[in-house]
């Protein structure tokens, strides 16, 4: 822990040193010219969090990480990231840094903002204090940190990343550290006589010549140095300083192969470690040309440089048998936003269904069908793209399971409507689809949702069998819970429509049976997987207990129903409570942070799960007495 903290602090000191010498963020004096299209730049492959993805996905992740929003003032994330990378000075005033705790802002000497977002210009003066506070927070064991301490670490990490991003392409930017006024030196280095400011890359390429010019200076008194030798020595010193400071920066876009090593490097690290490789050197030239074209607003030159760079990278990857696949498909998926539009269509369909309760209309019915069907189709397209991109079933994270439960719930609702034709299936589809996609969007707010698998889930076979099956079981029981809510409301507002109540009861029994079957099957498949992986079929792990609890709960409801100890209303109440059981088994057990299945996202779950349970209990408390009065 001490070693990690010391390294973090040391890197900050280095970064702070270079920033203090060259301004905190080395942005241009005026904004770079805007380009009409960043399509080619969006498709550049980048390695991030263990996965090769398009630059567009990385931009979305970083902006979301900084601000908690998918866009900044209606600006696409890739355009915002381009501004950071290419030195737009306006970024210093953009309020993109989310600080959830106003006490932190006050401690840094900043007036708390209502929107909880602050600009770099606001935070700059408080950076030394923030670094110190973050260092102290890092020294505290992760399990013992308070919410405020975790927030300090998060904010400091985001600001550090922001500063690092502004330095990524500095090797291609003209800088006063590489100013040459001596005409003799320009001639020796073969630089244009009319140009005074040069960039790191241009000078680094002449390092050998500079070494020749300064080779004998150690044996020569400083007072005897010529102006040419003084400027040459200063250039050598600045080259060394920049090489020391600019290391371990983000934006790993250049593949690096050495012996059996396969890694991706940032442009700076590439210059330091593998610039002698002719292909890699050519790619650095393309990046430098891209930077210059962006500053000048030359769209054609910019796109050509980006395409040349991407083609060179792809050709090298193919030679090594490691081609980056499906980047364009992921880019299309980002732009399509299939799950957002599906959620919108489900909500619109639900509103149509509510209107139909007031006045039944065939036009409303057809529109609702079209909306739900359209949402289901778009969601299916989104799922197919995720499967192709990830090359695995899309059920390995809590975010993905919510997407999948939404998808299955809508599918079950459509099947119900196909046979019942009484609006019930459309209501189930629209409610389930919208609610579960809304919950999924909460998890999507954490960043990139196309994550690499944790080791315990690294099996496509078992993901396709156990995880898919148990998740379908969750969906079945959740649909039964929705039907249970509907039955209770029908018993209050339409108690005399016995045929309608009987039809709803039949659907409730069917969905409970479906949920029980799939959960039972999924639990057994999970036991087989556990036996293959851990050498035991059952270990009373919290996740295993949760799955068993679902099976026992639904089985108990059927036994009570067959034994005539409960009627249709009792079954409906049991299905509503069954949803609580499912939520506990689904992600509530992750809150325990124990067991072999403790690998999911838990932040904020306890509060949300408690709210859900209280809402369900309040619903039953308010509705059951109303039914008994009728």
Image: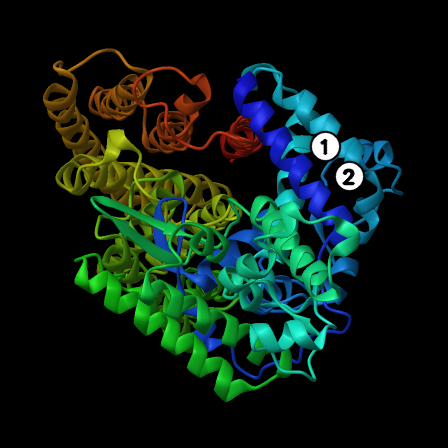
What residue occupies the far top of the structure in this picture? 540
Which dot marks residue 421? Answer: none
Position of 532 relative to 460 (above/below): above
Callouts 1 and 2 close, C-beta under 8 Å? yes
Relative horizontal placement of residue 579, taking residue 620 as reference (left or right): left
The residue located at (36%, 45%) in the rendering is: 451
Q: How many marks?
A: 2
* Residue 480 place in picture, x, y as percent: 33, 40
* Residue 15 place in picture, x, y as percent: 66, 43
* Residue 360 place in picture, x, y as percent: 45, 69
**Mark 2 residue element:** helix
Pointer 1: what residue? 131
Q: Nearer the viewer, residue 587 or 496?
A: 587
Residue 29 visible (yes or no): yes
Q: Residues within 10 Å of mark 2 (few under 14, many from 20)?
A: some
Residue 77 visible (yes or no): no
The answer for how far apart the CA atoms under marks 1 and 2 are is: 6 Å
Position of 366 relative to 435 (above/below): below
Q: How is the image coloured?
A: rainbow
Q: Which of 296 and 525 is in front in this view?
A: 296
* Residue 43 place in picture, x, y as percent: 40, 69
Relative horizontal placement of residue 108, taking residue 275 as reference (left or right): right
Pointer 2: what residue? 127
The residue located at (51%, 44%) in the rendering is: 248
């Amino acid at each position: 822990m001490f070693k990690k903290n010391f390294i973090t602090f040391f890197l900050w000191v280095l970064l702070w040193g270079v920033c203090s010498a060259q301004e905190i963020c080395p942005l241009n004096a005026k904004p770079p010219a805007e380009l009409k299209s960043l399509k080619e730049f969006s498709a550049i492959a980048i390695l991030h969090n263990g996965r090769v993805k398009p630059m567009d996905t990385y931009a979305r992740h970083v902006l979301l990480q900084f601000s908690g929003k998918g866009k900044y003032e209606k600006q696409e994330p890739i355009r915002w990231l381009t501004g950071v990378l290419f030195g737009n000075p306006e970024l210093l005033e953009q309020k993109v840094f989310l600080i959830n705790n106003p006490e932190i802002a006050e401690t840094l000497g900043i007036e708390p903002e209502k929107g909880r977002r602050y600009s770099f210009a606001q935070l700059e003066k408080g950076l030394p204090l923030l670094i110190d506070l973050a260092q102290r927070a890092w020294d505290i064991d992760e399990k013992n940190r308070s919410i405020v301490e975790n927030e300090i670490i998060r904010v400091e990490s985001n600001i550090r990343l922001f500063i690092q991003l502004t330095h990524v392409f500095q090797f291609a930017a003209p800088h006063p550290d590489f100013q040459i006024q001596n005409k003799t030196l320009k001639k020796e280095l073969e630089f244009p006589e009319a140009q005074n400011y040069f960039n790191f890359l241009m000078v680094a390429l002449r390092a050998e010549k500079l070494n020749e010019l300064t080779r004998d200076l150690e044996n020569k008194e400083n007072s005897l140095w010529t102006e040419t030798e003084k400027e040459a020595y200063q250039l050598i010193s600045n080259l060394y300083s920049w090489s020391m400071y600019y290391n371990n920066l983000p934006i790993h876009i250049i593949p690096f192969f050495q012996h059996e090593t396969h890694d991706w490097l940032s442009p700076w690290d590439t210059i330091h470690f593998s610039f002698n490789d002719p292909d890699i050197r050519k790619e650095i030239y393309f990046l430098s040309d891209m930077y210059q074209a962006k500053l000048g607003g030359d769209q054609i030159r910019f796109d050509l440089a980006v395409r040349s760079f991407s083609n060179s990278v792809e050709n090298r990857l193919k030679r090594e048998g490691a081609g980056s696949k499906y980047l364009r498909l992921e880019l299309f998926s980002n732009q399509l936003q299939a799950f957002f539009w599906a959620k919108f269509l489900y909500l619109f369909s639900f509103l149509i269904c509510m209107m139909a309760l007031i006045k039944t209309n065939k036009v409303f019915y057809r529109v609702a069908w079209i909306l739900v069907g359209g949402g289901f189709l778009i969601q299916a397209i989104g799922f197919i793209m995720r499967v192709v991109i990830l090359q695995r079933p899309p059920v390995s994270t809590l975010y993905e399971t919510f997407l999948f439960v939404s998808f299955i719930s809508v599918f079950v609702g459509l099947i119900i409507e196909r046979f019942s034709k009484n609006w019930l299936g459309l209501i189930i589809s629209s409610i389930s689809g919208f609610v579960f996609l809304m919950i999924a969007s909460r998890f999507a707010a954490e960043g990139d949702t196309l994550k690499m698998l944790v080791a315990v889930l690294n099996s496509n076979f078992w993901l396709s069998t156990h995880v898919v099956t148990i998740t379908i079981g969750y969906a079945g029981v959740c649909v039964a819970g929705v039907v249970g809510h509907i039955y209770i409301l029908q018993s209050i507002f339409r108690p005399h429509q016995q045929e309608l109540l009987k039809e709803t009861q039949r659907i409730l029994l069917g969905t409970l049976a479906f949920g029980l079957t799939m959960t039972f099957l999924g639990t057994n498949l999970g036991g087989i997987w556990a036996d293959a992986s851990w050498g035991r079929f059952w270990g009373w792990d919290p996740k295993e207990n949760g799955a068993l609890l679902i099976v026992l709960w639904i089985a108990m409801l059927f036994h009570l129903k067959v034994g005539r100890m409960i009627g249709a209303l009792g079954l409906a109440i049991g299905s509503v409570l069954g949803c609580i059981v499912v939520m506990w088994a689904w992600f509530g057990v992750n809150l325990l942070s124990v067991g072999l299945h403790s690998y999911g996202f838990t932040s904020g779950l306890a509060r949300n799960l408690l709210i859900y349970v209280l809402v369900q209990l309040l619903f039953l408390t308010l509705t059951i007495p109303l039914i008994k009065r009728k």
